[in-house]
Amino acid sequence: MIRGLVAALAAALLAVSAAAAGEESPTLAELEKEVICPTCHTTLALSTSPIAARMRAFITERIAAGDTKSEIKAKLVDEFGEGVLAAPPASGFNLLAWALPIGGALVALLAVGLLAGRWARSRPAAPASAGAGALDPELERRLDEELARFEA
Amino acid sequence: MPGRAKLVFQVAAVAVVALLVALLGWQVVNRNEGRGVADAVAAGRPVEAPAFELPLLDDSGTLSLVSLRGKAVVLNFWASWCEPCKEESPRLEAAWQRWRERGVVVVGIDAQDFRADARRFVERYRLTYPIVHDGDGSSLGRFGVTGFPETWFVDRQGRLVGERIQGPVSDEQLDENIALALGEK
């Protein structure tokens, strides 16, 4: 139990430190996946268009100049608008893009839970007189007859 | 589930579906806006040019198409990374010099481009006509622009007339369509 908790904590710390390193020292490969080519509407990593090549050169220049990932993205947004980001920023109206899927999933989970509860309650209860594993008397009588015939 | 709660749930579900259908409709209408304009021009039907107001590349303010009403306008969509744009830009500059005294304005719309690159381009090709910057390319969809360069002509009443020229424009195409936009043909 404690080992599991320590492992989870270590994994979380690693993830946080990796994200921080990505923010402070971004790589072209990372940003290529997070930036959209404005003419072909795919990520830069998948685009071979002239503007994608120019954007890669710009990102390389900015990395060399010591910009953080957020600074590079802000400069690209200033040039090309927010559509240049593969994931919309989680603020303002764009927050909807994050909130709706999460909210939808929560509502769906809630609905499934409610329906499952309703379904479980609506199932007919087992007869109170019959104990667990008890057989119907008629069935028990027939079973005894069959066994007797088999033994004979 | 109590009757009232069930009704609220059903109304909410219908509202969400209606909202999604409305969004889809809005998207379809907006996506086809430029296509409608291009179809009208191809059929020779004068149609009002889609409005825009964009920042000038030299940071001296903004330029709107409406502010040019009363003049014939040559709208040229371009970008500094577009190879054929290099070939045609001197022709646009020459047309601007040739026609400007007669009430013609050449407007360059630099789209999906870095401002610094576009400014270097303007300097290199010594372009003096007004150029606006449309970084996110919002004007492209309204006109149905599919590639660079692309040139359109607007008459004095703000309607698109003449040819929609996809690819580098020639001197002859410029003169012919400008005369049409001025109402001289």
Image (cartoon, rainbow, N blue to C red):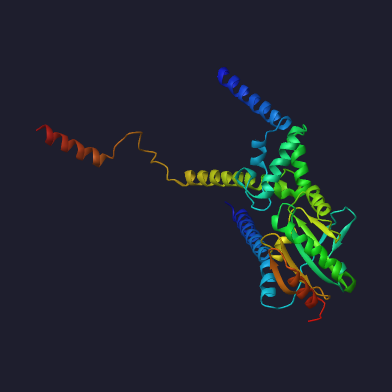
Q: Is residue A98 placed above or below B90 in the rendered structure?
A: above
- What residue do we see at 70% from left, 68% from top? B165
Query: Can the viewer see residue B159 in this picture?
Result: no
Q: Residue B67, position in %: x, y? A: 87, 67
- What residue do we see at 84% from left, 56% from top? B126
Closer-to-camera residue (A33/B24):
A33
- What residue do we see at 88% from left, 52% from top? B59
Q: Residue B180, position in %: x, y? A: 78, 78
Closer-to-camera residue (A67/B6):
A67
Q: Residue B139, position in %: x, y? A: 75, 61
In the figure, is residue B135 to the left or right of A86? right
In the figure, is residue A11 to the left or right of B157? left
In the figure, is residue B178 to the left or right of A106? right
Image quadrant in which you'd find residue B133:
bottom right
Query: Can the viewer see residue A6 in this picture?
Result: yes
Q: Residue furthest left?
A: A152
- What residue do we see at 81% from left, 47% from top? B116
Q: Is residue A63 placed above or below B93 in the rendered structure?
A: above
Quarter the C terminus of chain B occupies: bottom right
Image quadrant in which you'd find residue A113:
top right
Closer-to-camera residue (A29/A138):
A29
In the figure, is residue A50 to the left or right of B135? left
How many numbered marks appear? 0
Q: Residue B86, position in %: x, y? A: 74, 56
Closer-to-camera residue (B3/B127):
B127
Q: Is residue A109 placed above or below B138 in the rendered structure?
A: above
